[in-house]
Amino acid sequence: MRPFVYERPTSVSAAIAIASRPDTVHVPSTGAGTQFIAGGTNLADYMKLGVARPERLLDLNTLAEPALRQIRIDNDKIRFGALVRMGEAADNNDVRRRCPVLADSLKFAASGQLRNMASLGGNVLQRTRCEYFREISWPCNKREPGSGCAAMEGSNRQHAVLGTSDACIATYHGDFAQALVALDATVDVEGSRGRRTLTFSKLHRRPGETPDIETDLAADELITAIEVPLAQWSSRSRYLKIRDRESYAFALASAAVALDMDGETVRSARIALGGLATVPWRAREAEDTLQGKVLDEATAQEAAEAAFADARPREHNAFKIPLGKRTLVRALLETRDMKG
Amino acid sequence: MSDAKISSGLSRRMFMTASVSAAAVMPLVNSPTRAAQPASAKPAEPRDLSAVSMRINKQTYNLALDNRTSLLDALRDHVGLTGTKKGCDHGQCGACTVLIDGKRVLSCLSFAVMNQGREITTVEGLASAEGELHPVQKAFVDHDAFQCGYCTPGQIMSAIGCINEGHAGSEDDIREYMSGNLCRCAAYPNIVAAIVQARDETRRA
């Protein structure tokens, strides 16, 4: 592991001041020499592998602001401080009651130990598990821009079929982010140029020709909070995750679904797909097909077809298209059968 | 008979350490902290050691560590508590599970310097001073919840966390919430049975 300087800033502004020194800005946030660390479950692993090579770590656990560690639930929103741990959010009874898709997307992610460590802010920024990204001897456009992509013709069973480019097919593996993108969550960000709020769907960038640029964040920007709007219908929501083994595995396919129903008819549907795409994936085409329709097997199937109309399989991951469709159909019907 | 002296007086590890690598023994337990940051205003650099003070099994340790040292390596190589095991060293197997401030975590993915002021509990800290086993340890013995035993310290620490979190309500829950601890001998049925027993004893207590 590359040696690094370790610092314990005591406030958000102090952390940003260190991170915004001239040598660290204007590079992709994940490639910056100074990295924030909270749970460390993703970063420490990638530092051991030599994929992440920061020269300075800023420990966010010493930040004093209490709001960073709080979950606040109002009538119309849930606000998570960025340092709230996954386990705490998953076990929060009000989160589960008001919005099960949030709690389940956390509960079915990682393991009990990892959920006790990983912060929500760090969780949404977790990096891909693509084997060719993780092992530094392979060419990888995400790790080393312009070097090529070993996954294209390699073992690509777990890779993405949605949102891919000729440069990168690495999957975004997170679960919580699928619930957030489906529910139109927002992210509060603070950096040397001030504070801003961005919609969650703008946080991650599709790979395109620059898969090394994974997020919209500058190197000195820090997520401070995640806010999820709530409605009456948020309680009719569900996260279905399909894996190679029943627990403690990344999704082969997953679906986050929330339904606003008028009797049997869909007023509006929120759908995101995980394990299938390069970024947290909102399936708006699928949502549109359901609007105003009675939700049954046939309309659910139509939605699934729409969701995968632009899917692009590689040699080993074509199975993800029918699997993803079946996952979405089941998630839609199970969510329909929940109490509104 | 001929082994009696060794088994009573010397552990295998002590024997190996003493005979093979005496020079590598780390005398850092409770050693005075070496200054991590020089008193001068020299900016911090990666070669600097960092001072970190932790409570480990109710005893205070002041350590001076390379920033790269994981909590796992600090426990095993610097403090001499080798009960916590290194399996994958990448957060995938659970063998290195310890409690930090009462919560189960993976010590391999936690940099030791990030644990300033924290209360660490390892498997060595579970039994009472009189040697009475923790209910989870006793249950693992009662149910033969291991074969090779390498994952066992992590299983036990994780089981304590699982029970304390209230996630041991049913056998299905136990399997779900213990899924971060792999056992390549596949002693899983006995591990689940042990946790059920320990859960019930803990509830009665």
Image (tube, coloured by chain):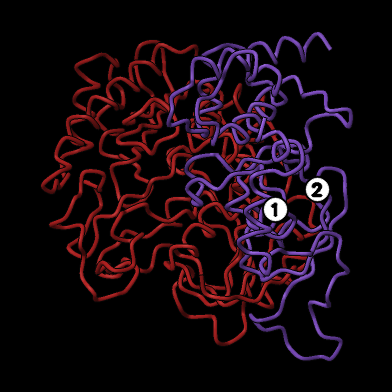
Amino acid type at image mark 1: Leu
Q: Which residue is mark 2?
A: B56
Q: Is residue A23 left or right of residue A182?
A: right
> Chain B's shade in the image?
purple
> Chain A's shade in the image?
red
Residue for point 32% across, 59% down: A206
Q: Which residue is mark 1?
A: B75
Specify the quadrant of the image occupied by residue B113. Answer: bottom right
Above or below: residue B187 compared with residue B33: above
Q: Residues within 10 Å of mark 1 (few under 14, many from 20)?
A: many
Above or below: residue A231 compared with residue B102: above
Instruction: Name which of mark 1 and mark 2 comes first in the sequence.
Output: 2
**Real-space Cα separation, disc 1 to disc 2, in angstroms:** 9 Å
Of residues A196 and B194, the one nearer the viewer is B194
Identify the element where label 1 is drawn.
helix
Rendered location of residue A110, percent (x, y): 49, 38
